[in-house]
Amino acid sequence: MEEQTIWDSSFFEHFSPRVQQQMLSLAESRTFAPGETIFREGDPSLYLYLVKRGRIAIEMNLPGRGARTVLVVGPGELFSWSALVEPRVETASARALEESEALAIKGGTLTDACLSDPGFGLELYRTLCEVISARLVATRLHLLDELTWPVDVRPK
């Protein structure tokens, strides 16, 4: 997925071209090897990521059940939105399932841009709220499904 067309199939497709360009100008590309841990639950959340290629598993530690994948994100999807929400601590872990590439934007830089350009901030946080809402619903449904299976017969 080219940077110029990354917006076509992402949560950011609703951004104005001006905001898209501003975000691209703040981003740096990161590549992750298969199985690489990008961050762990409880780590400081420093970057907002937008997947360009590959798949990233978002995992949570469930007491008595261990680490569980609650979501897999792919091209055009973002992860680590905690970089924009105080206290800026990762609420889950992220691990590359295959070789992956993502745009990484420092949360502090995005926050500064929001403060200096309220129009930019409105577009960013409005979209972020949509992402968080959709993720909460998806995660809740996934966890409910996970918790209804007895540990010894859960499908893999």
Image (cartoon, helix red, strand yellow):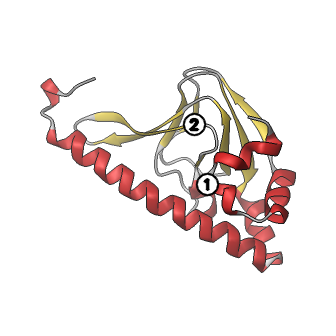
Q: Mark 2 Cα within 10 Å, few/some/many (few <14, many 20+)?
A: many
Q: Nearer the viewer, residue 58 or 54?
A: 54
Q: Secondary structure at mark 2?
A: loop
Residue identifier under label 1: 11
Kindly indicate the quadrant of the structure image that contains residue 100: top right
Q: Which residue occupies the extreme front position in the image?
A: 8
Residue 46 in picture, x, y percent from top left: 67, 51
Q: Say whether residue 6 is left or right of residue 87.
A: right
Looking at the picture, does residue 53 appear above or below residue 23? Answer: above
Q: Say whether residue 122 is left or right of residue 43.
A: right
Q: Which residue occupies the extreme bottom position in the image?
A: 118
Q: Secondary structure at mark 1?
A: helix
Residue 67 in picture, x, y percent from top left: 36, 34
**Quadrant of the image containing the C terminus:** top left
Residue 85 visible at all: no
Residue beneath the point at 35% across and 35% down: 68
For the residues bearing labels 1 and 2, Cβ distance under 8 angstroms: no
**Quadrant of the image containing the N terminus:** top right
Kindly indicate the quadrant of the structure image that contains residue 129: bottom right
Residue identifier under label 2: 74
Q: Nearer the viewer, residue 15 or 146?
A: 15
What's the residue type where badge 2 is placed?
Answer: Gly
What's the residue type where badge 1 is placed?
Answer: Phe
Residue beneath the point at 80% across and 41% down: 3
Residue 23 in picture, x, y percent from top left: 80, 56
Q: Nearer the viewer, residue 17 or 66?
A: 17
Give whichever of discs 1 and 2 has the lower sequence position. 1
Residue beneath the point at 23% across and 43% down: 145
Q: Mark 1 Cα within 10 Å, few/some/many (few <14, many 20+)?
A: some
Task: State the CA–CA distance, disc 1 to disc 2.
Answer: 12 Å
Residue beneath the point at 61% across and 65% down: 127
